[in-house]
């Protein structure tokens, strides 16, 4: 298998160093879009309508893409053919849909056309390595893995994008951006234009900008809610809860995230008392490092007794939400009242 990194692929394509077959493996919308644009630029704009094509295997037979790949470029140097959703490379079973000429693809891979570039956009975690066609593709194609990016890889890509536009980002702002987008590269890249516009004079993105412009997810809102509960700030807790309900969040879902947050606080408290570092805790719990950092900052201000009572109270609230017809907001307020009065069993 010939593997290269995403950045190396872009360098090669920019220098017009092109192979005949590529396998883009993994799901990451932003990188996939960037890769498609880089391939399209290999063909002059005026030729793209005739010499760049995309085929979705969920609706179009593979034979159509192969016919295109075996055709000569139309008044140009090369053809680019994107093959999307090639589920026949996986263990997935699809009922209905087009019939795919996998044997024809096998024959093409053995003798590819020099003037065609075949790009498989396989948005899957893995392919079925037992299949002959997959083994051949792994041997013949240049493979670029774009899925399952870790936090450092995401941070580097975001920082590079900002530097490309003559911007920088404060470390705390980058941490907050990672947290608010759940380290999702596509979400982060979508947030950058407004962050850059907001800081067009300073050319540096500060944490205040992220706080002001990047919306909080349910997890982040529940983080604030859990802090309000632990601080026994009933008014703030009820206000946040009612705001989430107004945003059409389901009470069961809110409570499930609350339970998860209190569980995390308990786990972090226990591991921290055992001498574990932030990095060790993040690795053990398989949780975003910034979430662990915030949990460590929060848990040190509360006793094991407070965290345990909050957790058990929320478990009881979950059972009530599932087994009664009582108003969810009323049930939450009763839980809060019991917790503030320290009467949770």
Image (tube, grey):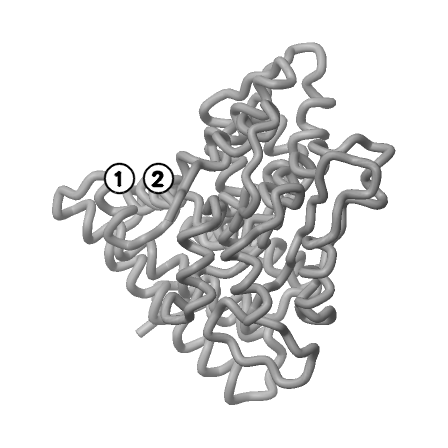
x, y percent for residue 59: 73, 71
Left or right, 56 with reference to 13: right
- SS for callout 2: helix
Which residue: 40% across, 77% down?
316
**Which residue lies under the disc numbered 1?**
278
User: Mark 1: few, some, or many residues within 10 Å (few <14, many ≥20)?
Assistant: some
Which residue: 42% across, 54% down?
138
| Spatial separation of the CA atoms under disc 1 and disc 2 | 6 Å
x, y percent for residue 331: 54, 75
x, y percent for residue 74: 82, 43
- When the figure is inspected, residue 186 is found, relative to residue 314, above or below; the finding is above
Occupied quadrant, residue 309: bottom left
Pointers 1 and 2 in contact (C-beta within 8 Å): yes
- When the figure is inspected, residue 304 is found, relative to residue 14, above or below; the finding is below
- SS for callout 1: helix
User: Mark 2: few, some, or many residues within 10 Å (few <14, many ≥20)?
Assistant: some
């Amino acid at each position: 298998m010939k593997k290269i990194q995403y950045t190396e692929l872009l360098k090669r394509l920019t220098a017009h160093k092109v192979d005949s077959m590529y396998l883009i493996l993994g799901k990451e919308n932003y990188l996939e879009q960037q890769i498609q644009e880089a391939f399209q630029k290999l063909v002059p704009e005026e030729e793209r309508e005739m010499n760049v094509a995309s085929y979705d295997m969920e609706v179009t037979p593979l034979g159509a893409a192969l016919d295109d790949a075996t055709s000569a470029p139309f008044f140009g140097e090369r053809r680019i053919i994107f093959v999307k959703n090639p589920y026949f490379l996986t263990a997935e079973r699809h009922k209905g849909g087009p019939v795919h000429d996998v044997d024809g693809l096998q024959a093409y891979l053995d003798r590819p056309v020099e003037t065609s570039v075949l790009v498989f956009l396989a948005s899957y975690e893995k392919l079925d390595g037992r299949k002959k066609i997959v083994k051949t593709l792994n041997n013949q194609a240049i493979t670029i893995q774009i899925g399952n990016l870790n936090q450092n890889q995401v941070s580097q890509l975001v920082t590079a994008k900002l530097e490309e536009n003559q911007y920088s980002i404060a470390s705390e702002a980058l941490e907050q951006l990672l947290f608010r987008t759940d380290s999702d590269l596509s979400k982060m890249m979508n947030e950058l234009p407004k962050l850059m516009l907001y800081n067009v004079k300073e050319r540096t993105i500060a944490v205040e900008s992220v706080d002001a412009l990047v919306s909080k997810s349910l997890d982040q809102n529940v983080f604030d809610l859990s802090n309000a509960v632990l601080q026994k700030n009933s008014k703030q807790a009820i206000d946040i809860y009612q705001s989430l309900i107004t945003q059409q969040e389901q009470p069961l879902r809110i409570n499930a995230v609350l339970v998860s947050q209190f569980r995390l606080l308990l786990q972090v408290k226990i591991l921290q008392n055992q001498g574990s570092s932030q990095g060790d805790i993040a690795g053990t719990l398989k949780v975003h490092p910034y979430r662990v950092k915030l949990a460590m900052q929060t848990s040190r201000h509360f006793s094991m007794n407070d965290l345990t009572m909050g957790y058990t109270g929320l478990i009881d609230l979950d059972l009530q939400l599932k087994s009664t017809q009582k108003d969810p907001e009323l049930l939450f307020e009763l839980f809060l009242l019991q917790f503030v009065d320290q009467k949770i069993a």
